[in-house]
Amino acid sequence: MHRLPFLFVILQAYKALSEEEFVDTTVRLAKNMIFDCVYPGLDLISQAEWFKITITGKDSMAIFSPEFGEDIRTDYISRVHFLNSSVTANDVSLFFHNASTADLGLYYCSLQLFPLGLWEKVINVVQTDGFEIRVPSNSHMVSEPGKNVTFVFQTHMASPLKHVTWERIRSHQIDHLASCNLNNGKSYGLKYQRKISISCSQGMKSSSIVIQNVTASDSGFYQCCLTTNTGENETFVMTLTVTDAKTDHQIFFLMAGGAASFLILVTSIIIISYCCRRKKVSKALWDTQTQPSKNYARNGVPDQTQDYKEEDIYVNCPVFSQRPNPR
C-alpha cells in the first residue's frame, strides 16, 4: 500500500510533462553549462528559485531574493552559481559546473511576480553531439538591425495540422520560441525578452512568426516543425543573418584607413628611392667634374698649389720723383 502514493506522484508528474508542459529550452549536456533565465516583463519580482525535477518532486538548487540576497543549497553549493556577479531580480541565469549524466533531465526557473503570480521557464538537459550538426538550411534571410523579421512556412501536407513549433537552433541549445496545439487551441512560449508573435488557427496550411527589433545576436538557424492529425511530420529550417551596421562602418573605415596607409607608404618609398637615385647621380657627376682638378690645371698645366705653399710676389718698380723737372 505504501507504494501507491509514490506511483501516484510519478503518474501525476508524467501527465503534467507529457500533456501540459512546454519545454522552453533544450540544452546539450556538457561539463559546464549555462541555464538562461531572464524575465522579459516589468512586474515586481519578490523571489526567484531554481529547481531540478526528480521522481519525488522538485529539488531546490538555488534561491534569490531582492531583499535577502542569494542562497545556494547544500547539495549544489560547489556546483552552481548565479551567472551575473551582481544578480538582479529579472536575470537569475545559472552556471552549472562539472555536470555528468546524472544531471540529465528537467530544470525549472521559478519567479514569484506581483500581481501576475508564478512565472516559470523549463529547461531540459539532453545528451547529444550538438544540434547544428543535423540542420540543413532551406532558405536564407538577411536583415538590418532594428527591423521586424517574419518567417513563413507553407505546408504541403493534405491532412489538418495538429501541432506547430518554432525553434531557434544553436550548437549547444535549442530555444523553443512558440508552439500551437491546434486541437485544443493552446499556445505556449513567448518567454523571451523580444516579443515574438505566432499565427495559430484551426485549418491553417501555413505558419509564421514575427521577431521584432532584431539585433546581430539573433543571427542563426530557425526551425518550424509541423505535425498533422495523421502523424505526418514536416520540418523547415531558415537561416537569419542580421548585419551589424556599426560593425560594417568600422570595417569600412578600417579598410579605407589601411588602403590610405598603404598608399602613403608606397608613395614615401617611391619618393625616397627617387631622391636617393638623384643624389647618387649628382654625386657621380660632381666626382666626374671635380676629379681632374685635383691633378691638373687648365690647359694641361700641372697644378702646383698642392705641392707648394703660396709665396709673396715682389716686383721692382722705379721710383719716380714727385718734384717737377727744371726747365
Image (cartoon, rainbow, N blue to C red):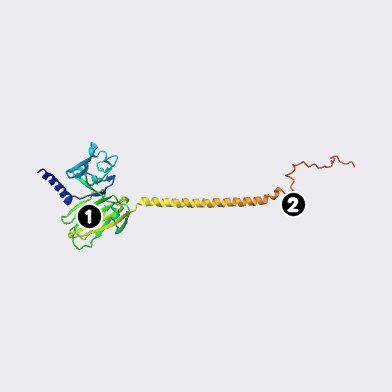
Q: Quadrant of residue 68?
A: top left
User: 131 and 138: which one is in front?
Assistant: 131
Residue reaching furthest left?
1
Residue reaching furthest top?
68
Residue shown at the point (52%, 51%) measured from the top left: 269
- Whether residue 123 is situated above or below residue 226 in the rendered picture: above
Q: Quadrant of residue 95?
A: top left
Residue 176 % position (x, y): 24, 51
Residue 132 % position (x, y): 29, 53
**Count of numbered marks:** 2
Q: Could you say which disc has been placed on residue 273 in the image?
A: none
Residue shown at the point (63%, 50%) measured from the top left: 283
| Gap in angstroms between the C-alphas marked 1 and 2 | 108 Å
Q: Quadrant of residue 57?
A: top left
Name which residue type carries label 2: Gly
User: 269 and 226: which one is in front?
Assistant: 226
**Label 1: how many residues lie within 10 Å, few (<14), some (14-19) or many (20+)?**
many
Q: Earlier in the sequence, mark 1 or mark 2?
A: 1
Which quarter of the rendering shows the C terminus?
Answer: top right
Numbered disc 2: secondary structure: helix
Which quarter of the rendering shows the N terminus?
Answer: top left
Q: Could you say which disc has been placed on residue 300 in the image?
A: 2
Numbered disc 1: secondary structure: strand
Viewed as shown, does residue 6 lie left or right of 154? Answer: left
Residue 274 % position (x, y): 56, 52
User: 246 and 237: which one is in front?
Assistant: 237
**Label 2: how many residues lie within 10 Å, few (<14), some (14-19) or many (20+)?**
few
Q: Which residue is mark 1?
A: 165
